[in-house]
Image (cartoon, coloured by chain):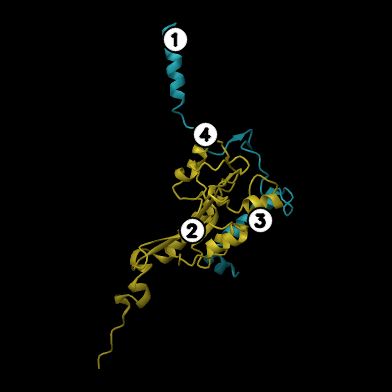
Chain colours: A cyan, B yellow
């Protein structure tokens, strides 16, 4: 009885050494963090995620002057 | 899915502090708060390097780990944000952050520490996108407008890049390959030409 209690107690003490999950959590393929409206659910994009991602990607690529030069602006 | 990151090219940063100014202006950041700073190493010595530093939106953010009220969260795009309604201004995140990103406004006559403020990657906070409440607490939400952080987008030398980490890595890789390395990048050779490039004077 005492041995079992000791084992449970030591396991409980070890739990304190664990690290909390830091990375983005997904449940059922969906974000499961604190609720915040995603950037694409805005007035401009109207929940069109694909369009938002395209826009951001274009902006991203425009940061390279080599790409801008090749594309001719 | 994008994983938003900043990268600062120390070979290009000219310490103009435009990123700092743009950030303060865009978000109407209060007096005494600097969400972004330019750090210079070996200032005044040939070969000095400057770097623009703000919240790096860590993949494994130490501020999130130490917050006693768990006010931090990470968006789907990997942007580390926090909820000012939950923040108690304890300052643990300031000690945990290796970049000195969390800032604390002084409130009241005795300089009491206010709620934490930091770079939001121009993504606002948990309030409704583009709302006045969001702007007052966290600044403008440029991501919801389909734009990248203002500090990176207006950088004149494109030293500071912001956006999807994979795309940034490609841009940076291409840049490094084009410009070479070591003495080719900066120094006497770049400014005045390399010794081997000198033309031999014609013999008379």
Few, some or many residues within 10 Å of mark 1 (<14, 14–19, 20+) = few
Few, some or many residues within 10 Å of mark 2 (<14, 14–19, 20+) = some
The furthest residue to the left: B204
Q: Are marks 4 and 3 on the same chain?
A: no
Q: Mark 1 vs mark 4: give the one in front.
A: 1
Q: Position of residue A49 (x, y in %)?
A: 68, 48
| Chain at tag 1 | A
Residue B11 in view of the camera: yes
**Label 3: which secondary element:** loop
Mark 3 and mark 2 lie on one chain; the one further toward the N terminus is: 2
Q: Is residue B22 left or right of residue A46?
A: left
The furthest residue to the front: B109
Viewport quadrant of the C terminus of chain B:
bottom left
**Label 4: which secondary element:** loop
Q: Are marks 1 and 4 on the same chain?
A: yes
How much space separates mark 3 and mark 1, taking CA atoms?
58 Å
The furthest residue to the bottom: B204
Q: Residue B89 or B139: which is nearer the viewer?
A: B89
Q: Which mark is residue B146?
A: 3
Q: Mark 2 vs mark 4: give the one in front.
A: 2
Mark 1 and mark 4 lie on one chain; the one further toward the N terminus is: 1
| Chain at tag 4 | A
Residue at the (69%, 53%) spot, across then down: A51
Q: Which mark is residue B37?
A: 2
Mark 2 vs 4: CB contact within 8 A: no
The residue labelled by disc 1 is A4
Q: Position of residue B85 (x, y in %)?
A: 63, 42
Q: Residue B151 or A68: which is nearer the viewer?
A: B151
Mark 2 vs 1: CB contact within 8 A: no
Residue B61 in view of the camera: no
**Label 2: which secondary element:** strand
């Amino acid at each position: 009885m005492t041995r079992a209690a000791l084992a449970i107690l030591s396991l409980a003490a070890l739990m304190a050494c664990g690290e909390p999950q830091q990375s983005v959590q997904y449940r059922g393929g969906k974000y499961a963090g604190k609720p915040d409206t995603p950037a694409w659910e805005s007035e401009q994009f109207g929940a069109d995620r694909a369009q938002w991602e395209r826009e951001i990607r274009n902006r991203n690529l425009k940061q390279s002057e080599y790409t801008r030069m090749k594309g001719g602006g | 899915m994008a994983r938003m990151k900043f990268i600062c090219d120390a070979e290009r940063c000219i310490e103009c502090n435009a990123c700092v100014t743009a950030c303060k202006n865009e978000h109407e950041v209060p007096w005494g708060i600097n969400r972004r700073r330019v750090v210079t190493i070996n200032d005044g010595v040939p070969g000095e390097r400057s770097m623009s530093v703000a919240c790096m939106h860590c993949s494994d953010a130490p501020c999130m780990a130490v917050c006693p009220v768990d006010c931090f969260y990470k968006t789907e795009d990997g942007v580390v944000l926090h909820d000012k309604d939950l923040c108690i201004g304890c300052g643990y995140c300031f000690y945990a952050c290796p970049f000195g990103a969390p800032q604390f406004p002084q409130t009241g006559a005795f300089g009491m520490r206010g709620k934490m403020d930091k770079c939001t990657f121009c993504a606002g906070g948990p309030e409704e996108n583009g709302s006045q409440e969001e702007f007052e607490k966290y600044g403008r939400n440029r991501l919801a407008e389909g734009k990248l952080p203002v500090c990176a987008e207006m950088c004149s030398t494109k030293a500071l890049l912001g956006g999807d980490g994979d795309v940034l890595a490609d841009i940076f890789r291409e840049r490094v390959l084009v410009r070479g390395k070591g003495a080719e990048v900066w120094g006497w050779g770049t400014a005045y030409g390399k010794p081997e490039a000198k033309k031999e004077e014609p013999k008379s």
